[in-house]
Image (cartoon, helix red, strand yellow):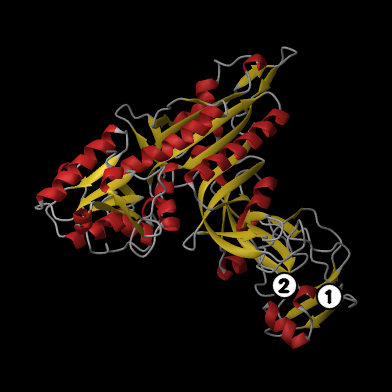
Amino acid sequence: MRMTQSFIYTTKETPKDAELKSHQYLLRAGYIQQVGAGIYNLLPLGFEVLENIKSVIREQMNASGASELSLGFVTPASLWQKSGRFEKYGKELLRFKDRKDQDFVLGPTHEEAIVECVKGRVKSYKQLPLNLYQIHLKFRDELRARFGLIRGREFVMKDAYSFHSSYEDLDREFALMEKTYREIFDSLGVEYAVVEADSGAIGGSGSKEFMLLADCGEDTLLVCKDCGYASNIEAGKRKKKDYPQSTQAPAEISTPSLKSIDELSLALNIPAYHILKCVAKGVRMQEGESKVAIFFINGADELEETKAYNAISKIKSSALELYDISAQELESKGYCVGFMGLGCKGDFVVFDEEICEGGVYLSGANKSDTHAYIKVDSMAHRADLVAVQEGDACPCCGKPLMHKKGIEVGHIFKLGEKYSAPMGATFLDVNGKAQNFIMGCYGIGVSRLISAIAEQKSDERGLVWESGIAPYECMIMISNIKNDSQREIGERLYKKLKKDGVKVLLDDRDERFGAKMTDFELLGIPVGYLIGRSLEEGKVEKIYRKEMRKELIDLAQILGE
């Protein structure tokens, strides 16, 4: 491609509201163009990078035995109503009516659509297992679209869905997809971590995230550098802390105006881990009402809200979300704010799994200015509720955990029967009995990868692409287009490389040398050939973008003469 015939336009100015360097460079280099909040055009350069990433993904997915298809971008709302997600998914799901007043959604994900596609066509266990995938446009109405393609409303995603006759076979496919994803991200040349994760709105019994490591990442990861354990903080585990037990006898004590853990610990000269922290949250229910959830954790710990929500949803599946409940709302329901504790009657009461049954803790006494040392006798519901902190012990090897930042670029789930059961999707097993399909799903944020890779790989000059995903393999820069010798050699090299099957960009613009060099650095193309002064010595300068290393090559050698 010749620059003079291309749709490549670069700018010097840093765009407003572009916080991340990846967002700035992709806009400045002409890879993307913003057309609305979280909605971008992929210009020719960006489109080429997207297609190269798709090729890497397709190669590995096809090698794994998966088959590609394409599901409709618009999905009937009736399918989402069958699965129960139409009401539960929230405002991120874009709903609309057509001219016949029928409800539809723009799918952010396609579990319902794929179940409907397979249902009735796959009838026997003999047709299983099956893995179907697509690379498709999606839409999610993000509340705060930001960071360019990293958190856009419209995006390209690779989503795959597997169907099985047993959970053992689902486990096999899950392991195969983890291996396939590792091969994809290894091929893309990125630094990443595979972490235990929360399943979120997709649901299911287990999931893993593939996190591209970057300082700008929105996700906080827990990583053990000794054994390799890694987890998203929302699903993080730690080695159980064995705190010394309190020897206080059960008794009430006056604690005027002492409400916080720190105040109690200081005034009473007791460690925070001898105090029972009571955290109240509001729960919005699918039925439209709001309820109160009470969580008890060790006073030395903090509540992890995703874990807290998961604990409530296991008790009551119609729980939509947790919210910060106000003191006024709690008081109107009869709670003694600041002194809530054991015996507090919430709609849901959950204890952290590290609270010691039979242990004595200082707890709010549910009356003003009063706490009490109380023995914990009964815990109907227990769950892991703690936000694991940096420095906590690794659950695998016991060494200190550390925090890293990451960008989620892939996620794999064990769905089980979450979608097949409510949608009536069954097959006949070996005994001729109808069974629900057992499912898995596996996603990669394809367009997000453009920004994520740019964030990890770019430098102070601009983008730096690996050869397999760059829009062009090399770029020829004619230093002075008005110099006949330089122009002739540039044209000859351009034609030779094209003949050899090399994807090459020729900068044949009538621009000064400095502008051409700046654009080469900004565009991030792996190799540049500079046709300039060294031509007088029969040489061409070869520039490696990643290291900005330069070497002189004989003209005869490069032209194959």
Disc 2 marks which amino acid?
A: Ala
Q: Residue at x 57, y 65 (%)?
A: 329
- Badge 1 element: strand
Give the quadrant of residue 245. Answer: bottom right
| Lower position in the chain sequence, tag 2 or tag 1 | 2
Q: Residue at x 64, y 65 (%)?
A: 402
Give the quadrant of residue 248. Answer: bottom right
Decide which of 266, 461 is in the foreground and name it. 461
Q: Is residue 484 left or right of residue 55?
A: left
The quarter of the picture where the C terminus appears is top left
Alpha-carbon distance for marks 2 and 1? 17 Å
Q: Residue at x 50, y 50 (%)?
A: 190
Q: Which residue is mark 1?
A: 373
Which numbered marker is on residue 41? none
Decide which of 47, 457 is in the foreground and name it. 457
Q: Residue at x 43, y 42 (%)?
A: 446
Decide which of 57, 359 is in the foreground and name it. 57
Residue 507 placed where, x, y %?
20, 49
Comparing marks 2 and 1, which lies closer to the viewer? 2
Label 2–label 1 contact, CB within 8 A: no
Residue 275 placed where, x, y %?
77, 74
Q: Is residue 483 left or right of residue 423?
A: left
- Badge 2 element: loop
Decide which of 401, 184 is in the foreground and name it. 184
Q: Residues within 10 Å of mark 2 (few under 14, many from 20)?
A: some
- Is 497 situated above or below 252? above
- Is 448 situated above or below 125? below
Residue 130 placed where, x, y %?
59, 23
Q: Which residue is mark 2?
A: 300
Residue 152 placed where, x, y %?
38, 49
Disc 1 marks which amino acid?
A: Tyr
